[in-house]
Amino acid sequence: MTADALLPDLTARVRGMAHARTPACPCGATGTLADRPDGTVVRHADTVAKAHAPDADPVELTRRLTAAADLPDVFLPPLGPGPVALHGRLVTFWPYGVPVDPDDPDAAPWEAAAALLARLHRTPAPAPLPVMRGPAEAARAVARLRALGSAPAAVPVLRAWAALPPWARAEDPLPDRATLCHGDFHLGQLVRLRGGSWRLIDVDDLGVGVPAWDLARPAAWYACGLLPGEEWGRFLGSYRAAGGPAVPDDGDPWAVLDVPARALTVQTAARMIVKAAADGRPPDEVEQSVIDACARMAAVPPRPAHTSGG
């Protein structure tokens, strides 16, 4: 089967699942929510289907799904106990939730997100569960950047990457392999249920690891000047108030956040440069600000040790 057959057949599957859940399905909103090499997501009414990356491991994905299903107050619960196969891809089904509105940044649910992460990090990790894939995904972004060949914008990014400790580059084991982590948190990983409650989505990187990684993308945005200090303060304060163990209860959080935030800055810059190259253009202003942050990072060594706030 060709990749071209995946989308129409995935659409047919999600329609069938929706009608099985609600025989009198109104057949309302339908369509493709995402279609990328690492995941294709389609919707029919109140049901969503996701075709995971071609290299997704069925055993690991099933364990991640089970962990999410056991945490319905944190994760959007999957529909069904495990993935099904479709054209060589693993497919999972989910209820539809309303995502964060990217055009209304003032309404971003930073407090709710922080509370969900704190609850996740406080939950004993089930065994067996794979390690969270955050560093591996950062390493993959850097590999794609290197594959471009000679790119002047890549120089400070690769220097900042080389300065990170091996665990943050997925070259050594994680210093924490006991804490339950999302592995790829950002506001796009939140949806609101009908009752108004927010839940995390996307279990592909879920696993045990360094909980500060889940705070690192907002921290990196703040450090790069892309997230206002007030919003960063709301997020960090809410995480601490909810008893999140990734950072100390008070004082300077950057002894813990420094390395993960640097790694996420590099990952973001690498993806931005690759995208700009694919579009045949130089980096835009926002992209250049992240590249410049990598240049500043390369000039100052990262904090040497990982410390947990638990």
Image (tube, rainbow, N blue to C red):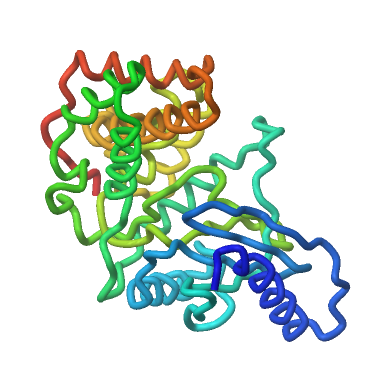
Q: Position of residue 44 (x, y in %)?
A: 75, 68
Residue 96 locus on image (x, y percent): 68, 64
Specify the quadrant that holds the N terminus: bottom right
Q: Is residue 233 visible?
A: no
Picture layout, residue 54 above or below residue 141: below
Q: Nearer the viewer, residue 173 or 240?
A: 173
Residue nearer the viewer, 229 or 165: 165
- Location of residue 266 by image quarter: top left
Q: Is residue 201 above or below residue 158?
A: below
Name the residue located 25 percent from the left edge and 26 percent from the top edge: 158
**Residue 227 at x, y = what percent?**
51, 25
Q: Taking 113 as reference, is 8 above or below it?
A: below
Query: In the shown orientation, is residue 49 left or right of residue 215?
Result: right
For this view, does 269 lie left or right of residue 260?
right
Identity of the residue drawn at 39% across and 71% down:
61
| Residue 144 in the figure: left or right of residue 242 | left
Q: Horizontal and vertical percent for residue 113?
A: 52, 47
- Quadrant for residue 213, please give it: top left
Q: Quadrant of residue 63?
A: bottom left
67 and 270: which one is in front? 270
Residue 240: in sight, yes or no? yes
The residue lying at 49 percent from left, 59 percent from top is 202
